[in-house]
Amino acid sequence: MTDYTAAGGHGAVPTTGVPSDEKGARRSQPLWEVFVRSRRGLSHTHVGSLHAPDAHMALRNARDLYTRRQEGVSLWVVAAADIVASSPDEKDAFFDPAGDKPYRHPTFYDVPEGLTHL
Amino acid sequence: MRDTAAYALRLGDDALVLGQRLCEWAARSPQIEEDVALLNLALDQLGAARSLLTHAGELEGAGRDEDDLAYLRDEPDWTNALLMELDGGDFGKTMARQLLVAAYQLPLYEALTTSADEGIAGVAGKAVKEVAYHLDHARSWVVRLGDGTEESHRRVQAGLDEVWPYAAELFERDALTERLLAAGVAADPDEVEPQWRRTVEDVLAEATLTVPETTWRPTGGRTGRHTTGFGYLLAELQHLHRSHPGASW
């Protein structure tokens, strides 16, 4: 079973056996995934990725690349290699079974009349 | 008023000329992330420069706006410190200069937030947050380059050795600063310098770099005597405006 990791927001890449032309200089600048919280109360949302030599610089690069138009009040960076991704091969087994179970959506409740703030 | 105008012009010229030097890194940085980072720093400097030049023009009262001051002055009329105009060299030299400048601009702008001149105090209030990040950025890189590989250490030390003597000019006092200190407008160089030195020495120690020893104190920027490369910088900065007066897009 192949393991998959995040790939710059493009889905999943196997952790082994992927041909790469990345040479020394680029390898010393691994990939980081960036998450921005746009304002208090909202969750951090994935916005993209970047290269940086370490976590400290990754956070600063994220600040410079992804929050220069006031997009956020908080930043996370995560080493892309540390993210475990679901495999495209498992898509059917993972996600299709949920397809015919509409009762999981909260749409079958009758909302009492006069109820507000729901 | 004329004194304050001249002082605002010094601050503005420092910011504009450094911003122009940083712009030269566009599409030349070691990585695309750093390209954006350096240009963000340049835009901060440019923003401060625009406010300061506009303010200087208004105080002067001769009808000159920010564009007139930026595009239509010749070398002897520019009052930036020489440190700002030195060519960027390699990334190590650029980061060494960034460290020296940011460690100066942070306590400088902090002091100027209480300037008796409201225009300068306003610009300083905004710039303090910006240069705090400039210092963080420069510190991060200088430490990584200095305490990095043998070559990165050698190159950032060489860059530091080149720019170091020019830092002394930042803390010079002259008749103008004395009058404006008495009026509560200027920042006191004698108070800014120890803060600068403490910051810089801390970073250099962490970066395993050596504080250069020199007695050479190049000076002249505040009175319009500039280095050879400054003319080329001005040519690039000004040629469009001078070739096509009033051009806009």
Image: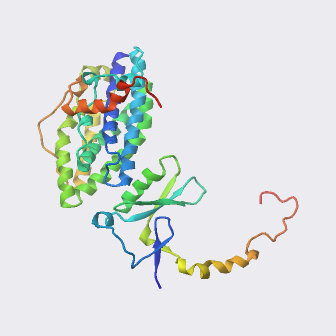
What is the tally of numbered marks visible in this picture? Answer: 0
Q: Is residue B163 left or right of residue A73?
A: left
At horizontal 42% and vertical 15% (from top left) the residue drawn is: B63
Query: Residue A101's spot in the image, x, y percent?
Result: 73, 78
* Residue A10 position in % (x across, y down): 50, 66
Indicate the position of residue A63 as horizontal and vertical percent values: 44, 52
The answer to which of B182 and A38 lies nearer the viewer is: A38
Residue at the (20%, 56%) spot, across then down: B153
Q: A34 or B104: nearer the eye?
A: A34
Instruction: Give the side of residue A99 with respect to residue A108, left or right.
Output: left
In terms of depth relative to the viewer, which is nearer, B95 or B36?
B36
Pick out the residue farthest to the bottom: A1
- Answer above or below: position of B237 versus B136: above
Whether residue B47 can be seen here: yes
Q: Residue furthest right?
A: A113
Q: Quadrant of the N terminus of chain B?
A: top left
Q: How is the image coloured?
A: rainbow
- Residue at 31% across, 27% down: B10
Residue B44 falls in which quadrant of the image? top left
Outermost top residue = B62
The image shows residue A29 at horizontal and vertical percentages of 34, 63
Q: Does residue B115 appear in the picture of this structure?
A: no
Q: Quadrant of residue B2?
A: top left
- Seen in the image, is A112 located left or right of residue A10? right
The quadrant in which residue B17 appears is top left
Question: Image point 63% across, 77% down: which residue?
Answer: A95
